[in-house]
Image: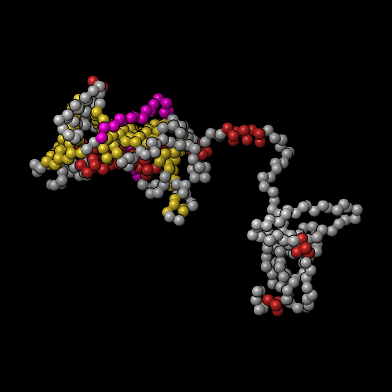
């Protein structure tokens, strides 16, 4: 049988409400761990990329505290889990409001009903109001095994601290739909907090241009700053906002500890017997087009081999292009003149036509068509493939991709107009 009883002041009950709001942004369930000297709330998100542990000191945070686990001796513990919304329905807002006549409480008493003669186990919360009204809540809990995330601060050489109220002002600039946060320690005495997102989808509409918001903070504005210059660390914007908002309710300083990308980062803060620690997964291997964190990405083994092989080549060699140039259409190719004594050029073999293709291949004879007879004195309409508009003889269209006026680079034979203007007056078709 487990014995667990403790009493909270109105101010402490309001802090429990605030921490439950913060934990609700990480997970739908919250785990409770009670020991003889402390009481803890823990939460782990569904992707297992963020772990939160909020510990309440038994002597400073509670008015009275008693915990006797059923087993384990002095190091024993009592663990259970409940839905976060169920606890928030009990620890509502405005539990501590001295100016309000109604809604505030005098004290909060919590106990655990775990007896063999009882049919169900309950987590009992009694709210004693200032009008003599007692509100009793009996919540069902589930036995669970609570696990903790280990973080070695001796390895985390990079650390900084700043007051939570100042950090919250910076987070208000971050977009509501941004996903990642890049913390970059510059060499010019500034630290940049850059929030961004790679893609936003809303039905069939996709935001192709990423949202990027950068906030530069001077190193002198930090209470403590010791970070390797040029180091990028990427975390979740949603997690960072939730942590900063809760730290601002305590009016305390926020401290960060981390070593390098892809290694855990921990935020720590607390006051008056409440210690909050958040261990987050980091990345430094993001998309280079969306975040500068890829600039510190260590090159992979394949990339390093490619770089070494490229650097070993002589400087006078020309690398082979990855893609051949496009084939010139047959309609633009002009017949080449043979020089006396030159050998005939062998034409490349044309591929066999595909019977299943939707397109009809152009025959060789189609490129050697002859214009019909026309009267040269009549006004005509032609195609000008040059970019020279100094003295146009007739109305022209301009094709900037061509080489010269209706002629190729290897031939001076021009293609004459093929249609009279009088035939165009009635329409092209």
Viewed as shown, does residue 62 lie left or right of 404?
left
- Res 165 quadrant in image: top left
Give yes or no for residue 162 being in the magenta stretch.
yes
Please state, as top left, top right, bottom left or bottom right, where the N terminus lies in the image. top left
Q: Quick one: which residue is furthest to the right in this view?
A: 341
Q: Quick one: which residue is furthest to the left in this view?
A: 132
Q: Residue at x 77, y 58 (%)?
A: 409
Q: Where does residue 199 sit, x and y in percent of width and height?
A: 46, 49
Please state, as top left, top right, bottom left or bottom right, where the C terminus lies in the image. bottom right
Name above or below for residue 5 compared with residue 97: above
Q: Residue at x 23, y 20 (%)?
A: 73
Viewed as shown, does residue 279 lie left or right of 19?
right
Does the rendering let one see residue 185? no
Q: Residue at x 68, y 56 (%)?
A: 354
Residue situated in front as seen by the camera: 17 or 78: 78
Q: Quick one: which residue is furthest to the top in this view?
A: 73
Residue situated in front as seen by the camera: 55 or 139: 139
Q: Residue at x 39, y 26 (%)?
A: 152
Residues shaded magenta? 142-169
Viewed as shown, does residue 156 lie left or right of 15?
right
Q: Where does residue 316 sit, x and y in percent of width and height?
A: 73, 38
- Res 23 quadrant in image: top left
Give yes or no for residue 60 being in the magenta stretch.
no
Viewed as shown, does residue 87 lie left or right of 287?
left
Residue situated in front as seen by the camera: 348 or 102: 348
Q: Where does residue 123 sit, x and y in percent of width and height?
A: 20, 35
């Amino acid at each position: 049988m487990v014995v667990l009883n403790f009493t909270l002041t109105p101010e402490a009950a309001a802090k429990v409400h605030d921490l439950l709001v913060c934990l609700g942004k990480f997970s739908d369930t919250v785990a409770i761990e009670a020991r003889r000297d402390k009481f803890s709330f823990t939460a782990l998100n569904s992707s297992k990329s963020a772990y939160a542990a909020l510990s309440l000191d038994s002597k400073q945070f509670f008015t009275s505290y008693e915990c006797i686990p059923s087993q384990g001796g002095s190091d024993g513990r009592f663990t259970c889990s409940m839905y976060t919304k169920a606890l928030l329905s009990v620890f509502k807002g405005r539990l501590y409001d001295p100016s309000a006549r109604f809604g505030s409480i005098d004290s909060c008493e919590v106990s655990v009903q775990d007896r063999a003669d009882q049919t169900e186990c309950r987590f009992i919360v009694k709210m004693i109001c200032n009008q003599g009204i007692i509100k009793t809540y009996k919540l069902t809990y589930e036995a669970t095994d609570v696990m903790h995330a280990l973080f070695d601060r001796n390895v985390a050489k990079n650390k900084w601290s700043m007051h939570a109220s100042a950090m919250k002002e910076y987070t208000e600039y971050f977009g509501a739909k941004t996903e990642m946060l890049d913390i970059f320690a510059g060499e010019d005495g500034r630290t940049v907090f850059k929030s961004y997102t790679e893609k936003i989808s809303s039905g069939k509409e996709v935001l192709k241009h990423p949202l990027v918001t950068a906030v530069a903070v001077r190193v002198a504005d930090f209470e403590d700053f010791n970070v390797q210059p040029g180091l990028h660390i990427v975390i979740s914007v949603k997690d960072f906002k939730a942590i900063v908002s809760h730290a601002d309710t305590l009016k305390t300083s926020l401290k960060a500890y981390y070593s390098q990308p892809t290694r855990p980062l921990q935020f720590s803060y607390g006051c008056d017997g409440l210690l909050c620690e958040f261990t987050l997964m980091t990345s430094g291997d993001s998309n280079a087009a969306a975040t500068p964190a890829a600039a510190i990405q260590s090159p992979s083994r394949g990339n390093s081999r490619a770089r070494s092989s490229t650097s070993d080549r002589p400087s006078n060699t020309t690398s082979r292009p990855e893609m051949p140039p496009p084939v010139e259409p047959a309609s633009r190719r002009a017949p080449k003149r043979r020089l006396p004594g030159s050998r005939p050029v062998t034409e490349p073999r044309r591929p066999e036509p595909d019977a299943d293709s939707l397109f009809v291949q152009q025959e060789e004879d189609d490129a050697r068509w002859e214009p019909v007879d026309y009267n040269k004195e009549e006004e005509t309409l032609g195609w000008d493939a040059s970019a020279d508009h100094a003295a146009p003889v007739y109305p022209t269209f301009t094709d900037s991709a061509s080489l010269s006026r209706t002629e190729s680079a290897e031939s001076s034979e021009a293609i004459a107009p093929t249609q009279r203007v009088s035939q165009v007056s009635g329409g092209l078709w």
